[in-house]
Image (tube, helix red, strand yellow):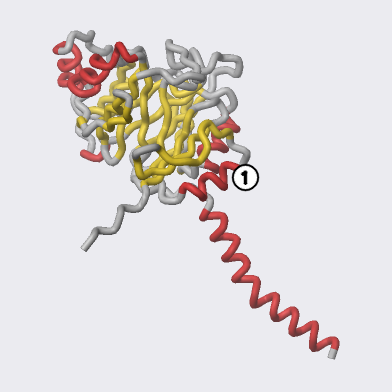
Amino acid sequence: MHKRLKTVLWLGLLLAAPAAIAARAADTSAVRPQFAQGSMNVYRRFAPEQRARMIEFYDKVLGLKSLQPINLGGGQQMILFGIGSGQIKLASGLKEGRQYHAGGVNDATGIRLFTLFFPDEAALSARFTAQGYPAPVFKDVGDGRRAAIAPDPAGFPLELVILPGAPVDAYPKVEVGINVSDLKRSEAFYRDFAGLEELPPVKDALLGVTKHPYRHGQTTVNLWSVGKALPADTGSAGIQYVISNIDAVDARAKADHVTVETPLGGVPGFNVRTVWLNDPDGVTDYFYQLGARPAASN
């Protein structure tokens, strides 16, 4: 009898094992970000007096698609530009409690530049000069590409890459350059927590650094590190993830002890839920879930 009981128990464990393993796998996947957009959005904060020039620059010089702005109340607007399935958001006004450090891409930690792609160097340069800006100084960077660094009107660097004759889908994308203090910690955040796809390192001849790319669709986060004792820029720019399961992200953030900038909650007047988190260098990574639309009345 005793032997038969042990056999029954052993068989029960074997039968239960696949279900237990599947449950653990489901739990693991459930707490990872559930991306609901084929890209991430990025945003820029700047002093209010630069608002008109910033809108002009991203519209007429960079040639991005202007979208309907979002009225945030109190006379504030979020200016939106479409690029592929994502957006570049311009936020007029600096946020209290965040750090700002202008200068070159290696002068501080944090998001130091956006990289944008264009088919025609002459046409892009002509738009710069037509709006009263100096033409970017392009250099050969290999593989038939040319690139230049040019600041936007608020002084934030942009890496402009010319890809002549590339497929149409090579242009509507954004790369986010982050100078980090500890490459291993930041790689773990964007790979293991944010769930981005790790790509092989890339030498950037223009920036003079080796970038470690992490991609989701049309957006790539490029990490590099040139020192641990640099000042921090935690306010000039940030990343927004559009997702379908904000509770899973919040739970994973708490489990991983990720720094919370603004706890899980809503936005007055908007049917959204958000949680604002910080990467290891204080960069804002905020997660955004749009609520269900009300059912149509008969």
User: What is the tally of numbered marks visible in this picture?
Assistant: 1
Percent across and percent down for residue 247 are: 50, 49
In depth, the one of 166 and 82 nearer the eye is: 82
Q: Is residue 297 left or right of residue 48?
A: left
Indicate the secondary structure of the residue bearing disc 1: helix
Split into 4 quadrants, where in the image is the C terminus?
bottom left
Of residue 42 and residue 108, the one placed in the foreground of this image is 42
Q: Which residue is mark 1?
A: 255
- Give percent across and percent down for residue 98: 49, 20
**155 horizontally vs 209: left or right:** left
- Residue 27 located left or right of residue 83: right
Judge by depth and name the residue closer to the eye, 294 or 63: 294
**Residue lying farthest bottom?**
1
- In the rendered view, tell whether residue 294 sits above or below residue 161: below
Question: Is residue 261 positioned above or below 191 on the image?
Answer: above
Q: Is residue 65 above or below residue 105?
A: below
The residue lying at 33 percent from left, 16 percent from top is 149
Amino acid under label 1?
A: Ala
Could you tell me residue 101's position as x and y percent?
A: 47, 13
In this rendering, would 290 be left or right of 298?
A: right
- Residue at image coords 21%, 33%: 67
How many other residues sit within 10 Å of disc 1, few (<14), some (14-19) or many (≥20)?
few
Q: Residue 15's x, y, as percent?
A: 64, 77
Given residues 5 and 201, the one toward you in this image is: 5
Quadrant the N terminus occupies: bottom right
